[in-house]
Amino acid sequence: MGKFLKGVKSEMKQVTWPTGKELRKYTMTVFGTVFFFVIFFMVVDFGIKSILDLFIK
């Protein structure tokens, strides 16, 4: 177990963490992508519902 933890410690020293500016950029990219897909699927869902309503009623 000790050898494993030493390996983890040495690997963590090699990790390059994002800067605050990069982190904000990546976060905004994720939010923008999620927002786009939410709107896209809302429109698709509304379209499918409208088409089905034409045939059902």
Image: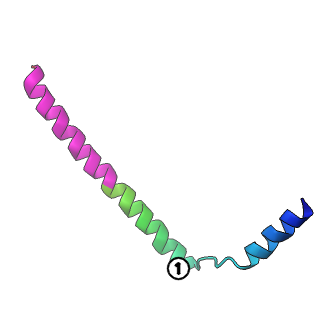
Quadrant where the C terminus sits is top left
Foreground residue, 27 or 55?
A: 55
Who's the residue at 33% across and 50% down the image?
38
24 horizontally vs 53: left or right: right
Residue under label 1, please give it: 21
Q: Secondary structure at mark 1?
A: helix
Residue 37 x/y as whole percent: 32, 53
Residue 20 magenta-highlighted: no
Tell me residue 56's x, y (percent): 12, 20
Q: Is residue 56 above or below residue 36?
A: above
**Quarter of image, res 3:** bottom right
Q: Residues within 10 Å of mark 1 (few under 14, many from 20)?
A: few
In magenta segment, residue 43: yes
Q: Is residue 54 above or below residue 45?
A: above
Quarter of the image for residue 23 reads bottom right
Q: Which residues are magenta?
A: 37-56
Q: Name the kind of residue labelled 1 in the image.
A: Lys
Q: Residue at x 91, y 63 (%)?
A: 2
Furthest residue to the right?
A: 2
State the residue at coordinates (84%, 63%): 4
Query: Is 20 positioned to the left or the right of 31 in the image?
Result: right
Q: Name the outermost residue toward the top.
A: 57
